[in-house]
Structures are given as structure tokens and as C-alpha cells.
Amino acid sequence: MFAPLTPLDWKRRAIKYYPEKIAVIDEDKKFTYKEFGKRTDQLAFALQNAGILKGDHVAVMLPNTHYMLECFYGICQLGAVMVPLNYRLVAKDLEYIIRHSDAKMIIVDAEFGKLIEGIQGNLPLEKFIIVDVPGHDSALEGVSYEEFISEIPADSVLAPVDIDENQMLTLNYTSGTTSNPKGVMLTHRANYLNAANFMYHLNVVHDDVYLHTLPMFHANGWGGVWALTAAGGTHICLRKVDPPLILELFEKHNVSLLCGAPTVVNMLVNEPKAKEVKITTSPRMATAGAPPAAALIAKAQAVLGLNMMHVYGLTETSPFILYCEWHKAFDSLSPDEQANIKARQGIELAFNGETKVVSQEDGREVAWNGKELGEIVTRGNVVMSGYYKDPEKTAEAIRDGWFYTGDLAVTYPDGYIEIQDRIKDMIISGGENISSTEIEGVLYKHPDILEVAVIAVPDEKWGEVPKAIIVLHPGATCTEQDIIAYTRENMAHFKTPKTIDFVEALPKTATGKLQKFRLREMYWNSSKKVN
């Protein structure tokens, strides 16, 4: 007996056992699992009637609403491929992705209609399906989502489609930095096993209430779109990251779990209302996307009472390949010591396969001494099947059966891996390797600093030296000399930033990851030099 591994089967299970349980809450709308199942079936039927067949691609540009959740199931249960779009991109990039992905249709939120209006005539799409949003009129020519699915009777029974677990489920595009975005092909099997990791290691249970603070378009919400349904938990939709609203929703809906990049954690702990609101639900929060500073983790636990969990992965790995496993013995450590451990990326998850750190010189696994630097590589169940229509980039990333992440790390004697930097972010000054994340970790402990990014900038004597770009807390009057003196007191002098720039905001992706490449371009491609 054989059944393909697909996260779509979890919707069937949830409807079977929890038909009347609230599955989705989206502002003032609520849907039971039975109602949610009917809406996804109506969407699938409508798409099928409109010509979408097994293997076809459908682009989706929606925020974290019930419509987005419905698309993950309605599109994919046809054996079609969902192409989640990052709505923070510019029209040029969106046009490239839509054309490159071979999408036949698009489902788009009216709020983002203006992004598509200017390129609509250039897109080879057969149909535009528009989710109406009060206050956001769109000039896009298309059919209303609700009208589109309402043509299908709610009691319609969709004929099952044969699914191969190795066929593509979603086509997720990475952000383009120096080249066009790359399409990551993720299969039913990879998504299933990643979601199983999400369930097991984030302790997802039937009574969980999950707040979708993480964009669902980003690596399929890290698997949360599938995992909460598998457990029969409740999805709380959130149209955009709004710290005061998030703090309110914690108590209103008894939120027990959420995910987000370190910048989202930072936004929450520095929200003025955080000092006024007493959170009694003790939510678990998984963070990833950039190495979080230990000071930030400690603050999140102390100020908000969040139980922080650190995970690590990439879009190309579905995304989880490491998590910071917590041992009971750690409970006796001081808060600072606990935060230092939680800042590590950790060890392999149960279902993803093998991950290790290897020497860039000879490919052997580095010593487990917390000192020898190497690149994180992985292989197994969650790695992409390749970049869509790009065999050359696929061959560069996957070599001898291993996916090379581009992240530099060390392995501690207990096997815990900790990232030191991206290969391109490591600062090499006078022949010495300097970790930008180490400097950031020190600076985040400074009481006046809200956000910080450290990059290499050109230097005539040393080749390159560290520079810190800092966002201060409102009202803070810290100077460049103050910051430099602080770092010299807390780390080796050769590692300290040589100059400081104060800015109002740092460039970030839609998921909150710092875009250091934009900062590097500013200083390396301009006349700015450090003497």
C-alpha cells in the first residue's frame, strides 16, 4: 500500500474530524473547517472550469487573508502549481516572475492592483481574478474572486486528482539581488516533510491558535499554512504587521504561536504598548530569516514573555533544516546564557535529512570546536528539485548531492551550528575574518540602539573594515564616538566598526530580512571611502 506524501491530505483529515471547529479567523469573518473546505473546493472547481489542469501554474499576490489560505489548497488540489508572489516587489520584477513562471492566471488583491495595472498588457495571462477590498478600487480588468467561486454550488464534489509526491506543489521565487529572481521548485513531498518538522519541533497541537505574522508567500509561511491545518488548529489572518494590533490579538484570540524574522521581534519589543499590555498567553514564537542577536531574544522573553524558538532554513530547503533544540538542563542557566544558546541555529530536524558545516578548502566536515569556520550544506527530503528553467544555477547550488547554502558557520562540541555570516557578508580586514553578526550582537545590547546592520566598506590600508549603520531609539542622542567606544569595551579592537552612520530606517525584504547588499552597493559603488 502506498499513498503519496502531500500536505493537501491534511485538509481532508481536518474536515473529517473537526468539521465544526473554527479553522480561520480573518478580522470579523470566521470559517469552520467544513466551510473552509467548501470554499477551497469551489475555488478548485472554478479554476478547473476556467481551464486550469494538472501541472498548470497559477500566480497569487495576496496578503495574509483567508483568500491566500484558500489558494494554497484550492489551486494545489487540482495538481496545479501555486506561484506565490511577493507584493513588495516593483512592477518590473513582478512582470519577470509572472512571465518566467509560465503562470496562466493570477489571483490578486485589489490593494496591489496598481502594481499590476501598468503591466497587465504585457502579461500572457488568460484570466485575472481580483479579491475586492473595501477602500481599494482597482482598474484591473478581471473577475471578482467571490463571483468566480459563487458560480460553483457549495455542495459540489471535486473528482480526486492523482498526485505524484515528487511533482511540483509550489514555485517560490527568491528575491533577486545581483540577478533576476530564481524560481525554487518545491514538491508535495518536500512541503509535507517540512510541515511535519514545523508541527513536531514547534510543538503544534490541536488547541493551538496561530497568528500569521509571517507572510504566507514566503516559503509557504515556513510550512505553517499546512501544519496548523494538520493539527486542526486555528489560523488567525493578519493583513499586515501592525505591532499594536498584534499585541491586542494575543489576548483577544488567545494566540499561542507565531513566526517572524528578527526585525518583527524587534518591532514588537520596542512597541510602546508592549510596556502597557500584559500578555498572559505566553506565546511561542519561532524566528528565522537572519541570525537573531542574543540580546534581542532575551528582551523578547523578558518584555513580552514570548517563548522564543530559533529555526533556520532557506526557500530552497522548504525552508527548515536546523532548529535550536531546548534541553531541560538549559533551564538552570541565567537568562543571558539561555539567550546565547537560543541565538544558535542548532541541530538537524527529525524529517529533513542531513545538515553539516564543511571546510571551503577541502570539503571535509569542520571540527566541532566552535571555532573552525565552514559553509553549511544539506541534503535530504526538503531540498528543492532545482531552479525553474535554470539548470546552470541549479548545478552551482547543488553539487555532489549537497545543497550549498552560502552561510558560514561553526559547529560547537554539542553539534549545535551557529552562523557567523553569509559568505558575501564576512568582512576580511587585513587578512582577519570578522563576523558582521558578532558585531551586531554586541551593538544590540546598547540601550540606545533600535536596529543595526554591519557591513564591510573599502579601506586603503586594510582592504576593507567594518562599518555600522544604526537606527537609534526615538529621543536617543548617542554619537559616533560613543558607539565606537562602546564596541571597543566589549570586543577585540580589530573587530570594532571604524565608522558609524545613523539612519532613520534600514532596507529590508518583505519578510523583514536586512538587505545588506543595498547598503554595500551604497558604499562600494559611490565615492564614499573610509580613511
Image (tube, helix red, strand yellow):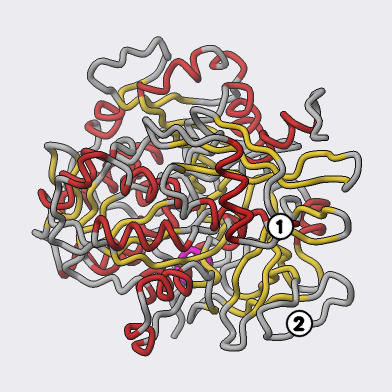
The part of the image, by quadrant, that contains residue 409 is: bottom right
* Mark 1 neighbour density, 10 Å: few (under 14) some (14–19) many (20 or more): few
Q: Is residue 300 above or below residue 80?
A: below
- Whole-angstrom CA distance, mark 2 to mark 1, is 31 Å
Position of residue 448 in the picture relative to residue 397 (left or right): left
Q: Position of residue 80 (x, y in %)?
A: 49, 48
Seen in the image, is 184 located left or right of residue 154?
A: right
- Label 2 sits on what residue type? Glu
374 relative to 428, above or below: below
Element assignment for label 2: loop
Q: Which residue is mark 1?
A: 493
Q: Quadrant of the C terminus?
A: top right
Q: Is residue 45 visible?
A: no
* Residue found 49% across the figure and 36% down from its top: 478
Q: Position of residue 465 (x, y in %)?
A: 78, 46
* Range covered by the magenta-colored residues: 189-193
How crowded is the residue under tag 2: few (<14 C-alpha within 10 Å), some, or many (20+)?
some
Q: Write down the residue under mark 2.
A: 365
Q: Nearer the viewer, residue 245 or 369?
A: 369
Q: Position of residue 173 (x, y in %)?
A: 59, 44
Q: Nearer the viewer, mark 2 or mark 1?
A: 1
Q: Quadrant of residue 525?
A: top right
Q: Residue at x 30, y 36 (%)?
A: 239
Query: Is 306 placed left or right of 323 in the picture?
Result: left
Q: Which mark is residue 388?
A: none
- Residue 509, x across and y down, in percent: 53, 38
The answer, for residue 310, to whether it is visible in the render is yes
